Image (spheres, rainbow, N blue to C red):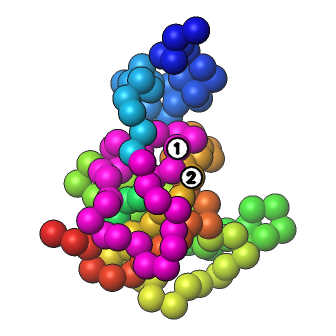
Amino acid sequence: MDDAHPTTDTVTLAAVDPARAADLSAPAVALNPPGGMLDLTRNVPIADVVWRRRAQVGGRVRSIRVRPWGEVPTLEAVIVDSTGALTVGFLGRRRIPGITLGCSLTVEGMVGVRNNKLLILNPAYDLRPLAR
Protein backbone atom coordinates (compact mmCIF):
# COMPACT_ATOMS: atom_id res chain seq x y z
CA MET A 1 0.00 0.00 0.00
CA ASP A 2 1.28 3.47 -0.87
CA ASP A 3 2.28 5.80 2.02
CA ALA A 4 0.72 8.82 0.28
CA HIS A 5 -2.90 7.63 0.50
CA PRO A 6 -5.56 10.06 1.79
CA THR A 7 -6.33 9.88 5.49
CA THR A 8 -8.63 11.57 7.95
CA ASP A 9 -5.80 14.11 8.37
CA THR A 10 -6.75 15.51 4.96
CA VAL A 11 -10.36 16.05 5.98
CA THR A 12 -9.54 17.78 9.27
CA LEU A 13 -6.72 19.90 7.88
CA ALA A 14 -8.97 20.95 4.99
CA ALA A 15 -11.26 22.60 7.52
CA VAL A 16 -8.32 24.56 8.94
CA ASP A 17 -6.37 25.35 5.77
CA PRO A 18 -7.82 24.03 2.49
CA ALA A 19 -4.89 25.33 0.43
CA ARG A 20 -2.43 23.12 2.34
CA ALA A 21 -4.65 20.07 2.92
CA ALA A 22 -3.24 18.24 -0.09
CA ASP A 23 0.35 18.73 1.07
CA LEU A 24 0.31 15.94 3.66
CA SER A 25 2.86 13.99 1.63
CA ALA A 26 5.61 16.43 2.71
CA PRO A 27 8.01 14.80 5.18
CA ALA A 28 7.50 15.76 8.81
CA VAL A 29 10.20 17.73 10.58
CA ALA A 30 12.03 15.32 12.89
CA LEU A 31 12.47 16.75 16.35
CA ASN A 32 14.10 15.27 19.39
CA PRO A 33 11.81 14.99 22.39
CA PRO A 34 12.26 17.89 24.81
CA GLY A 35 15.16 17.27 27.13
CA GLY A 36 15.98 20.44 29.02
CA MET A 37 16.20 23.63 27.01
CA LEU A 38 14.86 23.81 23.47
CA ASP A 39 17.29 24.33 20.59
CA LEU A 40 16.08 27.64 19.15
CA THR A 41 17.76 26.95 15.80
CA ARG A 42 15.33 24.07 15.13
CA ASN A 43 12.24 26.27 14.82
CA VAL A 44 10.06 25.78 11.76
CA PRO A 45 7.79 28.44 10.26
CA ILE A 46 4.25 28.32 11.65
CA ALA A 47 2.92 27.94 8.09
CA ASP A 48 4.79 24.60 7.85
CA VAL A 49 3.28 22.88 10.90
CA VAL A 50 1.08 19.88 10.19
CA TRP A 51 -1.83 18.61 12.26
CA ARG A 52 -0.98 15.54 14.37
CA ARG A 53 2.78 16.03 14.00
CA ARG A 54 5.26 17.38 16.55
CA ALA A 55 6.58 20.83 15.79
CA GLN A 56 8.81 23.46 17.35
CA VAL A 57 7.88 27.03 16.49
CA GLY A 58 8.85 30.43 17.78
CA GLY A 59 7.49 33.92 17.55
CA ARG A 60 6.08 36.84 19.45
CA VAL A 61 3.05 36.58 21.72
CA ARG A 62 0.25 38.55 20.02
CA SER A 63 -2.53 37.92 22.52
CA ILE A 64 -3.14 36.26 25.88
CA ARG A 65 -6.40 35.26 27.51
CA VAL A 66 -7.65 32.96 30.23
CA ARG A 67 -10.84 31.05 29.64
CA PRO A 68 -12.35 27.86 30.98
CA TRP A 69 -12.19 24.60 29.06
CA GLY A 70 -14.94 22.79 30.88
CA GLU A 71 -14.20 23.60 34.50
CA VAL A 72 -10.45 23.99 34.00
CA PRO A 73 -8.97 27.49 33.63
CA THR A 74 -6.72 27.61 30.58
CA LEU A 75 -4.16 30.21 29.57
CA GLU A 76 -4.22 30.69 25.80
CA ALA A 77 -1.50 32.61 23.97
CA VAL A 78 -1.37 33.28 20.24
CA ILE A 79 2.16 33.13 18.82
CA VAL A 80 2.87 34.83 15.48
CA ASP A 81 5.80 34.78 13.11
CA SER A 82 6.12 36.16 9.59
CA THR A 83 4.23 33.16 8.15
CA GLY A 84 1.20 32.76 10.42
CA ALA A 85 -0.24 32.31 13.89
CA LEU A 86 -0.66 29.39 16.29
CA THR A 87 -2.57 29.10 19.56
CA VAL A 88 -0.82 27.60 22.59
CA GLY A 89 -2.89 26.35 25.52
CA PHE A 90 -1.74 25.71 29.08
CA LEU A 91 -4.41 23.71 30.94
CA GLY A 92 -4.92 24.60 34.60
CA ARG A 93 -2.90 27.81 34.38
CA ARG A 94 -4.15 31.36 34.82
CA ARG A 95 -0.73 32.91 34.19
CA ILE A 96 2.87 31.88 33.55
CA PRO A 97 5.58 34.26 34.75
CA GLY A 98 7.46 35.66 31.77
CA ILE A 99 4.74 35.09 29.18
CA THR A 100 3.59 38.61 28.39
CA LEU A 101 2.36 40.45 25.31
CA GLY A 102 5.18 40.90 22.82
CA CYS A 103 7.61 38.45 24.46
CA SER A 104 9.59 35.91 22.42
CA LEU A 105 8.21 32.42 22.98
CA THR A 106 9.35 29.10 21.51
CA VAL A 107 7.12 26.06 22.01
CA GLU A 108 7.41 22.39 21.11
CA GLY A 109 4.67 19.81 21.12
CA MET A 110 1.98 17.93 19.21
CA VAL A 111 -0.10 20.10 16.88
CA GLY A 112 -3.85 19.68 17.21
CA VAL A 113 -6.97 21.58 16.24
CA ARG A 114 -9.55 23.35 18.42
CA ASN A 115 -12.31 25.55 16.99
CA ASN A 116 -10.78 25.12 13.50
CA LYS A 117 -7.47 26.67 14.63
CA LEU A 118 -4.10 24.99 15.03
CA LEU A 119 -3.16 24.49 18.69
CA ILE A 120 -0.32 23.07 20.77
CA LEU A 121 -1.56 22.03 24.19
CA ASN A 122 0.73 22.04 27.26
CA PRO A 123 3.93 22.45 25.22
CA ALA A 124 7.53 22.54 26.33
CA TYR A 125 8.42 26.23 26.11
CA ASP A 126 11.38 28.57 26.18
CA LEU A 127 11.29 32.32 26.83
CA ARG A 128 14.74 33.19 25.45
CA PRO A 129 14.99 35.59 22.49
CA LEU A 130 14.61 33.87 19.12
CA ALA A 131 17.73 32.75 17.22
CA ARG A 132 18.52 34.86 14.17
Magenta stretch holds residue 54: yes
* Residue at 75% across, 62% down: 69
Q: Nearer the viewer, residue 79 or 111?
A: 111
Boundaries of the magenta span: 30-55
Residue at image position (52%, 30%) is 13
Q: Find residue 7 and report its horizontal and vertical position in percent.
A: 60, 20
Question: Label 2 sits on what residue type?
Answer: Met
Q: Establish if 16 lies above or below 92.
A: above
The dot on residue 38 is: none
78 relative to 119 in the view: left or right: left
Residue at image x 41%, y 72%? 38
> In the rendered view of the protein, which quadrant contains the N terminus?
top right
Q: What element carries label 2?
A: strand
In what element is the residue under mark 1? Answer: loop
Quarter occupied by residue 28: top left
Q: Main secondary structure of the magenta part?
A: loop
Neighbours of disc 1 within 10 Å: few (<14), some (14-19), many (20+)? few
Residue 52 among magenta residues: yes
Label annotation for residue 53: 1
Q: Are marks 1 and 2 in contact (CB under 8 Å)?
A: yes
Q: Mark 2 points at which residue?
A: 110
Q: Which of marks 1 and 2 is nearer the N terminus?
A: 1
Say which quarter of the image contains residue 67.
bottom right
Determine whether, in the image, residue 10 is placed left or right of residue 37: right
Relative side of 86 to 59, left or right: right
